[in-house]
Image (spheres, grey):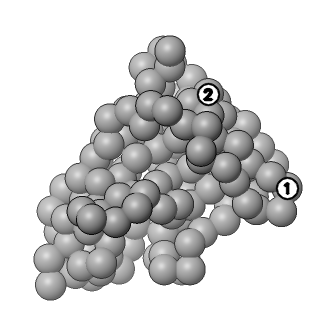
Amino acid sequence: QVQLVASGGGSVQAGGSLSLSCAGSRGSVSLVCMGWFRQAPGKEREGVAILDGAGTATYADTVKGRFTISKDNARNTLHLEMNSLKPEDTAMYYCASALTGLRCSSDGTYRKDLITDWGQGTQVTVSS
């Protein structure tokens, strides 16, 4: 089973930036449907940014204008550029793709209920 590994997290002050990367344990992360999710303590896992097979990105309202999702076709990796970070961005960040059960729709919505293994996340901590 393919597992995705997120990396690049860390601790920054509010207003700072971080760049996350995601790679598959067996190489490709799948470029059909990919996304970043996060889960803060005591909260449900939420979608942060989704990139569908057509290259259309959809963002959660809370990160619009601050986060950018992108893919590297040559390296088969997924990235999340996070700027103007806020304390409320503190969470464990995970990546997902069609290979791990993420499903994208043409209207920008997605399904994550089929994902059973979220792989290795990366912690992002933003201090005020």
The residue shown at (55%, 37%) is 115
Amino acid carrying label 1: it is Ser
Indicate which disc, 2 or 1, sits on the residue closer to the N terminus.
2
Question: Label 2's element?
Answer: helix
| Mark linked to residue 36 | none
> In the rendered view, would you say 105 is above or below 107?
above
Tag 1 residue: 106
Q: Position of residue 21 (x, y in %)?
A: 40, 43
Instruction: Tell me if residue 19 can be seen.
Output: no
Q: Residues within 10 Å of mark 2 (few under 14, many from 20)?
A: many
| Mark linked to residue 99 | 2
Horizontal side of residue 14 vs 93, given as left or right:
left
Horizontal side of residue 50 vs 9, given as left or right:
right
Q: Position of residue 32 (x, y in %)?
A: 73, 37
> In the rendered view, would you say 57 is above or below 51?
below
Quarter of the view holding residue 3: top left
The residue shown at (40%, 47%) is 94
Q: How far separated are the C-alphas under marks 2 and 1?
A: 18 Å
Quarter of the view holding residue 114: top right
Q: Quadrant of the C terminus?
A: bottom left
Horizontal side of residue 34 vs 123, given as left or right:
right
Instruction: Tell me if residue 25 can be seen.
Output: yes
Q: Position of residue 90 (x, y in %)?
A: 26, 68
Horizontal side of residue 85 vs 12, given as left or right:
right
Question: Label 1's element?
Answer: loop
